[in-house]
Amino acid sequence: MSIITLSRVAGSLGDETARLLAESMQYRLMDRSAMEKTIDGEGFPDIPLDRFDEHSPSFWENFTTGKDVYLDRLRTSMLESATGGKAVFLGRGSQFIMNGIPGTFRVRLIASHDVRVARLTEILGCDVKTAERYCRKSDHDRHGFSRFFFGGHWTDPATYDMTLCTDNLDSRTAADIVRDAYKASPASKTDGGKILRNRLTAQIVRNRILYVERVPVDLLEVEAEDGHVTIRGTVTVRENADRCETAARNIEAVTSVDAEVYFVNPVMTY
């Protein structure tokens, strides 16, 4: 599928490395700016994307529905963009969203504390203490973002196919190393198109149920396999189970549906 995801710590030359990598491979760079142009979909509520974007959520945001809307929009954007292959995804949990899709190469760029601070004082035009605070806040936000949305550990080496320290590298050299490592890896020779299409179909069905038809369903899970879709969840109005199935059947890529959506009496106590 020719997909590379690039995660980075502040001061590791991640943004510039991603840009140069995409240019050298003639891939599309899917950074924040590019994804904001594709993240709007049919029926999605309008929420400010920068409220969650690579930020650690506040206490109260743990109890809002904005989290689910943001994540569904983000997944839809990435999966749709990935279907064309030849893309470099910069951050935004792409290493988690693309996990398990053959043909994906997941990279993390790091640097030592002193090098990060020195680079940031130059980039931001600030003093050392400000750069240090910036590093701490950035690490805190990205760690919180990963845990909140994906339940993953941003620093876990097993999350990535390659971790590269850029202490003694410039961004051009780092991009060349990532490119050569990708070309030498099995990921460059495998095709995850089928799995990607199934995930996208499942996401489209989820979006249709929640945001287009606006069916109130709890614990919604959707799986897709070559046009066959399985929907799981609970509803408090019996008719809404049928609405879930109808919403899925009206999608062109769906050929058959198993609806395991159960009615739960809201007045019952356990």
Image: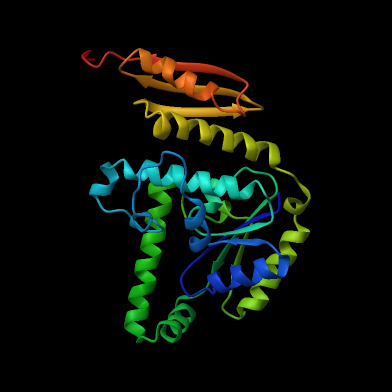
Q: Position of residue 36 (x, y in %)?
A: 47, 57
Above/below status of 22 relative to 56: below
Residue at 65% x, 66% y is 22
Residue at 58% x, 45% y is 80
| Image quadrant in which you'd find residue 209 | top left
Above/below status of 17 relative to 160: below
Residue 89 lies left or right of residue 48; in this view the side is right
Along the line of sight, which residue is nearer the eye, 148 or 75? 75
Residue 43 lies left or right of residue 130; in this view the side is right
Q: Position of residue 232 (x, y in %)?
A: 46, 22
Q: Position of residue 159 (x, y in %)?
A: 56, 52
Q: Position of residue 268 (x, y in %)?
A: 22, 13
Residue 110 lies left or right of residue 25; in this view the side is left
Q: Quadrant of the C terminus?
A: top left
| Image quadrant in which you'd find residue 101 | top right
Along the line of sight, which residue is nearer the eye, 97 or 240? 240
